[in-house]
């Protein structure tokens, strides 16, 4: 939604929480909205013209405060007392990009989190089943990253069974990056699986395919993370201290 000139003035007065002279409004408009093209020597007159015309309307958002003699203070405007501005923040829509971009973005997101958690980490130059190597307290960990945007309420991931068998060890972890939009901003959640846990699920025939480990993760109405419509994996999500 594009803001009108009066919308911008309203936002300035809302933030100020007090009446302002048009000269002050002009200064704060330029600071809050750098895209305004008017020079400061003409902007106060433009504001004054717009507001003096608007306050005559019954539905105006603005009013002029009165002075001690009952008249109106010259060049000063305020929001009506019963006016409560609901600020609308415009967020960019994430474009549709290739899986190469999504996959590499997920790897960097995991790398960043690992650094926050004290792991010395780097992305492998060649993906041979391991995307990230991380070390902490002289112990090394191999991490495979899978990334998915939400689609029809679910996140889908697939791990090659052959690659899983080749890289299975106690130091190998699989991190699924769940990217979604929440309250207008994009966030990542991370489902962290030790290789041993996936091995247990494979051996118990939890996954139907014999060629791939196919995972679908959904978030329930209660905020639970459900794997393949059966298993609650909430305790695996954002559990960075599980990498030991």
Image (spheres, rainbow, N blue to C red):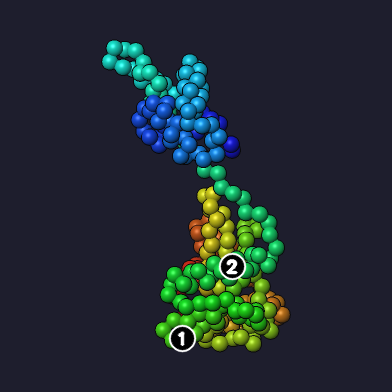
Q: Compare residues 15 and 187 and report the one nearer the observer.
A: 15
Can residue 58 be seen in this snapshot?
Answer: no
Q: In which quarter of the image is the N terminus?
A: top right
Which of the 4 image quarters holds residue 199? Answer: bottom right
Q: Position of residue 118 (x, y in %)?
A: 42, 75
Location of mark 2 (residue): 106
Residue most toward the left?
68
Q: Is residue 205 left or right of residue 50?
A: right
Give the residue at x 35% y 18%.
73
- Picture coordinates of residue 235, whole percent (x, y): 47, 70
Q: Name the residue under label 1.
A: 139
Callout 2: SS:
helix
* Label 1–label 2 contact, CB within 8 A: no
From what the image shows, is residue 240 above or below residue 221?
A: below
Q: Left or right: 121 with respect to 93? A: left
Q: Where is residue 46 in the image (x, y as percent from the top left)?
A: 51, 24
Specify the quadrant of the image occupied by residue 215.
bottom right
Residue at 43% x, 35% y: name it: 28
Q: Tell me the residue at 28%/15% (across/down).
A: 68
SS type, badge 1: strand
Q: Earlier in the sequence, mark 1 or mark 2?
A: 2
- Give me the C-alpha separation between circle 1 and circle 2: 23 Å
Q: Is residue 170 above or below residue 214?
A: below
- Residue 74, image x and y in percent? 38, 18
Considering depth in this image, is 51 or 229 the residue closer to the camera?
51
């Amino acid at each position: 939604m594009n803001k009108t000139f009066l919308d911008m003035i309203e936002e300035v007065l809302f933030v100020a929480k007090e009446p302002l002279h048009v000269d002050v409004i002009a200064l704060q408009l330029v600071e809050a909205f750098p895209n305004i093209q008017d020079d400061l020597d003409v902007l106060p007159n433009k504001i004054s013209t717009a507001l003096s015309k608007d306050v005559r309307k019954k539905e105006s958002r603005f009013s002029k405060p009165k002075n001690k003699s009952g008249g109106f203070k010259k060049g000063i405007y305020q929001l009506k007392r019963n006016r409560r501005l609901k600020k609308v923040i415009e967020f960019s829509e994430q474009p549709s990009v290739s899986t190469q971009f999504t996959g590499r973005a997920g790897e960097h997101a995991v790398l960043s989190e690992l650094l926050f958690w004290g792991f010395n980490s780097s992305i492998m130059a060649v993906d041979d089943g391991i995307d990230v190597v991380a070390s902490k307290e002289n112990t090394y960990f191999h991490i495979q990253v899978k990334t998915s945007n939400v689609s029809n309420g679910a996140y889908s991931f697939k791990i090659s069974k052959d690659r899983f068998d080749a890289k299975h060890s106690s130091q190998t972890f699989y991190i699924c990056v769940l990217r979604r939009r929440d309250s207008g901003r994009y966030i990542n959640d991370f489902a962290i699986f030790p290789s041993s846990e996936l091995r247990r699920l494979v051996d118990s025939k939890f996954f139907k395919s014999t060629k791939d480990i196919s995972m679908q993760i959904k978030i329930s109405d209660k905020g639970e993370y459900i794997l393949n419509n059966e298993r609650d994996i909430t305790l695996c999500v954002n559990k960075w201290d599980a990498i030991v």
